[in-house]
Image: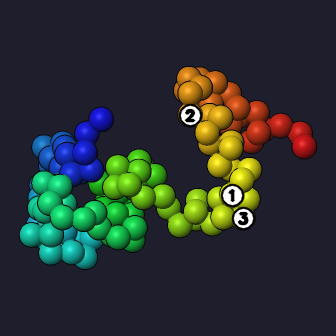
Amino acid sequence: MATLGEFIRRRREKLRESDRQYSLRQVSERVGIEPSYLSKVERDIGSPPSEETLIRIAQDLELDVDVVLALAGKVSSDLQEVIRRRPELFGQFLRDLKDLPDHAVLRLVREVRDGDW
């Protein structure tokens, strides 16, 4: 899997192929950071940005926020709150899911979401 910086840079450059609004400078302006900082993020220099900045970058580049946060070694604050409410339960649940194939996890998610409780 790509690093956070590679992932962001590839997406921005792909969008820029068809839309000049995705230059480093224009993206950084929309996100509210300096172009030099976005450049460092894309080159994986320094610590990853804050959750809020990563969310703005992901939204601007139409990326999945949770994927961007995971690549930065972070978990969104809303998911952290869910886990904090029942840490033992969610800790075990996530550990049990880690070795399951994607199709099994998706089936479980659909069953929980659509099931009658």
Q: State the image coordinates of residue 74 (x, y, percent, origin top left).
A: 42, 58
Residue flagged by tag 2: what amino acid is it?
Lys
Mark 3 secondary-structure assignment:
helix
Q: State the image coordinates of residue 14 (x, y, percent, origin top left).
A: 18, 42
Q: Is residue 28 above or below residue 16?
A: below
Q: Residue furthest right?
A: 117
**The C terminus lies in quadrant:** top right
**For residue 111, which quarter of the picture?**
top right
**For residue 30, which quarter of the picture?**
bottom left
Disc 3 crowd rating (10 Å Cα; few below 14, some 14-19, many 20+) is few
Q: Which residue is mark 1?
A: 87
Q: Residue at (34%, 55%) from the top-left corner?
A: 72
Given contact means CB atoms under 8 Å apart, are the residues at marks 3 and 1 in contact?
A: yes
**The N terminus lies in quadrant:** top left
Q: State the image coordinates of residue 24 (x, y, percent, origin top left).
A: 12, 61
Q: Which residue is mark 3?
A: 85
N-terminal-most mark, 2 or 1? 1
Q: Is residue 15 left or right of residue 58?
A: left
- Give the number of callouts: 3
Mark 2 secondary-structure assignment:
loop
Q: Is residue 109 above or below residue 43?
A: above
| Residue 30 in view in this figure | yes
Mark 1 secondary-structure assignment:
helix
Q: Residue at (29%, 67%) from the top-left corner?
A: 49
Q: Which mark is residue 98?
A: 2
Tell which of 90 and 64 is nearer to you.
90
**For residue 93, which quarter of the picture?**
top right
Residue flagged by tag 1: what amino acid is it?
Pro
Question: Which is more foreground, mark 3 or mark 1?
Answer: 1
